Image (cartoon, rainbow, N blue to C red):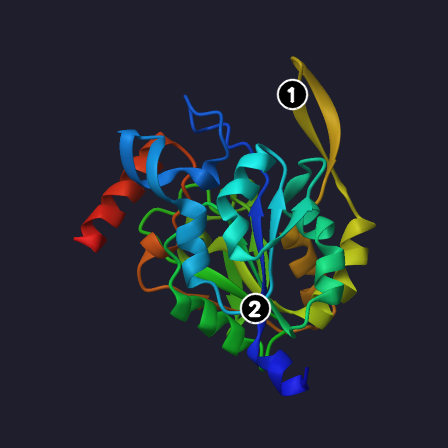
Amino acid sequence: MTQTDNDRKVASIIMAAGRGSRMKGYDGNKTLLPLVPEASLFEGRQPIILHLFEQLPQGPKALIVNHRKDDVVRLTAETGAVYIDQPVLNGTGGAILAAAGFVDAAPAEQVVITMGDVPFVNGSSYATLVAGLATNDLMILGFSPADKKQYGVLEIADGQVRKITEWKYWREYPAGRQAELTVCNSGIYAVRRESLAHYLPILASRPQIVQKEVDGRLTDIEEFFFTDLIEYMVQDGRPVSYHVVDDEVETMGIDDVDALQKAQAIYSARIR
C-alpha cells in the first residue's frame, strides 16, 4: 500500500462498551437501540450503531466493546469492524488505551474517535475534522447550544483550543467569563495517528483517581480521560483546533429515554 493510499483512508474507533445506566427499563447495549421503534421504544429497526457506521469515513474500524458484547458483535458482523475488549470500564481514555494495538497497526494516518450513541453526525463533519489535521495534531467536533447544561466547554484563543474545561470547574467562573465560552465538546475527535500513538503511553501512566459508589460504598477507582491527552498535547505546543456543527442535533447523544424518543422522531421526520 502506498503512502497516498494511506492518506486516503481514515481509521475509526467507536466506543460502544458502556451499559448506559440512564436508559431506564433497558438492559441492552444502548448503541443497539432502534431509530425506528416497532414493538416498543427499545425494539425495532435501524440500530443507532449501524446508522453511525453509514457516515464514518472509509477505512479500518474498531469497536470498543464490553456490555452485551455478543449482541454488538452479532448485529455489526457485516461492517468488517474489529472488536476490542475494554475489560474494565475505566473512562473514555481507557477505551482508547484498549485500542492502542489497533492504533499502532492501522494503515491510515488519521483516526476518528466517536461514541457509539451519536448517530446523526454527518459524513461532511467527519471529513472537515480530518481535513483539519493538515495543520493540527487533533481536531474537536464542537457544538454551540442555547443551554450549555453540564457539558464540557472549549477554551479557545486565536483559533486554537487551549483547554477543555468540565462543568464542575467552569460553573465557578464569573458570569461574564461563562458567557464567553460558547463551544461545547461533543466527545468526537480526529487525530493524527502518529500523535495518538505517541501520547497513549503518557495517558496510561497518569490515571486519575475518582470516587464511585460500588456496592453501596465509595471506592477509589482509576480512570483515564481522553481530554487529559488533549491537555498534554496543548502543553507540548501541539496544535489543537475545532469545528462547530451548524445544528446541535448532529452531536446529540442518546443517553436516556427522552433522548431516544427525540432521536426516533428526528429520524422519522428525515426519512419522510
* Residue pictured at 73% horizontal, 51% vertical: 97
Q: Residue at x 51, y 53 (%)?
A: 78
Q: Which x, y percent locates residue 37?
A: 28, 36
Q: Which residue is mark 2?
A: 59
Q: Foreground: 219 or 54?
A: 54
Q: Which label lies toward us, 2 or 1? A: 2
**Residue at (45% x, 73% y) in the render:** 128
Q: Is 73 on the left-hand or right-hand side of 211?
A: left
The image quarter containing residue 144 is: bottom left
Can residue 1 be seen by looking at this rendering? yes
Label 1 Cα crowd, 10 Å radius (few <14 / some 14-19 / many 20+): few
Question: Callout 2: helix, strand or loop?
Answer: loop
Q: Earlier in the sequence, mark 2 or mark 1?
A: 2
Which circle marks residue 213 in the picture?
1
Q: Residue at left 55%, top 46%?
A: 166
Q: In the displayed structure, does residue 164 sit left or right of residue 101?
A: left
Would you say 80 lies left or right of 217 here?
left
Horizontal and vertical percent for residue 243?
Answer: 45, 68
Residue 198, disc: none
Going by the numbered disc 2, the residue's amino acid type is Gly
Q: Is residue 181 visible?
A: no
Instruction: Give the residue type that dot 1 points to.
Output: Glu
Cα–Cα span, label 2 and label 1:
39 Å
For disc 2, the neighbor class at 10 Å (few under 14, some 14 to 19, many from 20) is some
